[in-house]
Image (cartoon, rainbow, N blue to C red):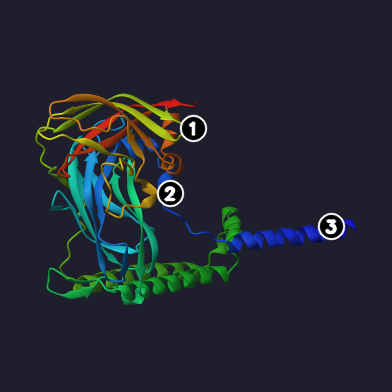
Amino acid sequence: MSKSAIRTWAAAGLAVAVAATSLYVPEASAHGEKSQQAFLRMRTLHWYDLNWSTDKLRVNEKMTVSGKIHVFKNWPETTANPEHSPAFLNIGIPGPVFTRVESYIGGQFVPRSVNLELGKNYTFKVVLQARRPGRWHMHTMMNVEAAGPIIGPGKWVQIDGTMADYKHVLTTLTGNTVDIEKVGTAGIWGWSFFWIFFGFAWIGYWVAKPVFVPRYMARKAGDESIVSPTDVKVGLGFMVATLIITWVGYNAGNSANPITIPLQAGVIGTMEPIPEGAPTVEAKVEQATYRVPGRSVILKVRVNNRGITPVQVAEFETAGIRFLNGSVYKDETNYPPQLLAPEGLSVDDNSPILPGQSKVITLTGTDAAWENERIADVIYDPDSRFGGLLFFVDSSGFRSMAPVGGPLLPRFT
């Protein structure tokens, strides 16, 4: 085969490869929460007792995401915390596929930023209205100033229907009923196209002359004749027309909407946490190890039962991943399966911890989620520390929670 034929076949093969890779667009599996540092997800906010009211709905229907937030006391020193920086409760979604209708923290309506105390627990609720059909991955999320978005557990939600049917009707403070999805759209389109054509007219006038670079070079060389008296008049005409049109449009807008209120951007203040009594169960980590080959975290914990009923370890949660002691506790909340290890937590001594008893137990949390969710990356951090929540249950099913944390030592054998 000649060299020219070889080049031809190689070029054809390259073209086919490029076309194939261009046409193949795999579905994104999530928003990139795995790229967020492990220490952020483990030592900042812990989202627990989460409930998605549904995972399938139609356009215009509403769903509620609710639960509790624990603000970790040993927040990373290198990251701004919500006690001193404003925080905004949000939902992480790929664009405006939902409309956030209401947001609450501690039962208080929170359309703006708030402050949260370290070491405290808060209830939250977000009401969403479905807007765009599709299968979407949505997260709980808290935006903290100077720290960025802190992402919580994510769940797939299916929206059926047609976006053309979407309506978000509200009654304004002046008593008018408007559809937020369509109000003002005629003006937006009209003014946008007007200024596009206005700009093209301005550019077209000068392009009809010698083009920009030759004119600039001639003007820089001192050629005054390149700008004619007509050019000056046209420039002044465009400027005056711009000012007049802007003034007329501004006054027309004020006449059509005489009563306006600016967007509210202040900080509401510190939210009311969940009332706390004396802790019924206390837990302190004496040693924490991550075994790399087995994808297991091994915690040696001293537990003090200060309650009046025997308790057993039910669950260990960190970074949204839940490791359950299957012989003690079963989850029935339809939690995202990739973040749930139903039999992932084993206890060396599973017998109940009696009231007043202090007991050292060894917990082992094992699941592929350590690697799949990139939580194991924490062992490569300069400050290899973990954080999480231990849950205990008594014979009546009552759950007690104790935050735990400390250095995490890797083990490679």
Alpha-carbon neighbours of circle 3 within 10 Å: few (<14), some, or many (≥20)?
Answer: few
Q: Residue at x 29, y 74 (%)?
A: 182
- Number of callouts in the render? 3
Provide the secondary structure element on which disc 1 rests: loop
Question: Is residue 81 visible from the viewing direction of this image?
Answer: no
Alpha-carbon neighbours of circle 2 within 10 Å: few (<14), some, or many (≥20)?
Answer: few
The quarter of the rendered structure image containing the N terminus is bottom right
Q: Residue furthest top?
A: 286
Q: Could you give the CA–CA distance between mark 1 and mark 3, rounded to whole angstroms?
A: 48 Å
Is residue 168 left or right of 92 when viewed as pictured?
Answer: left
Query: Along the line of sight, which residue is nearer the eye, 304 or 164?
Result: 304
Mark identifier at residue 278:
none
Q: Residue at x 47, y 56 (%)?
A: 28
With respect to residue 167, does 128 lie above or below?
Answer: above
Tag 1 or tag 2, which sits nearer the N-term?
2
Give the x, y percent position of residue 31. Answer: 41, 52
- Residue under circle 3? 6
| Amino acid type, callout 3 | Ile
- Residue under circle 2? 32
Provide the secondary structure element on which disc 3 rests: helix
Q: Could you give the CA–CA distance between mark 3 and mark 2, rounded to whole angstroms?
A: 43 Å
With respect to residue 383, does 222 lie above or below?
Answer: below
With respect to residue 99, does 90 lie above or below?
Answer: above
Tag 3 or tag 1, which sits nearer the N-term?
3
Give the x, y percent position of residue 406. Answer: 31, 27
Q: Could you give the CA–CA distance between mark 2 and mark 1, rounded to whole angstroms?
A: 25 Å
- Residue under circle 1? 293
| Amino acid type, callout 1 | Pro
Give the x, y percent position of residue 250. Answer: 26, 69
User: Looking at the image, do the residues carrying marks 3 and 2 touch, with CB atoms under 8 Å apart?
Assistant: no
Query: Along the line of sight, which residue is nearer the eye, 102 or 263?
Result: 102
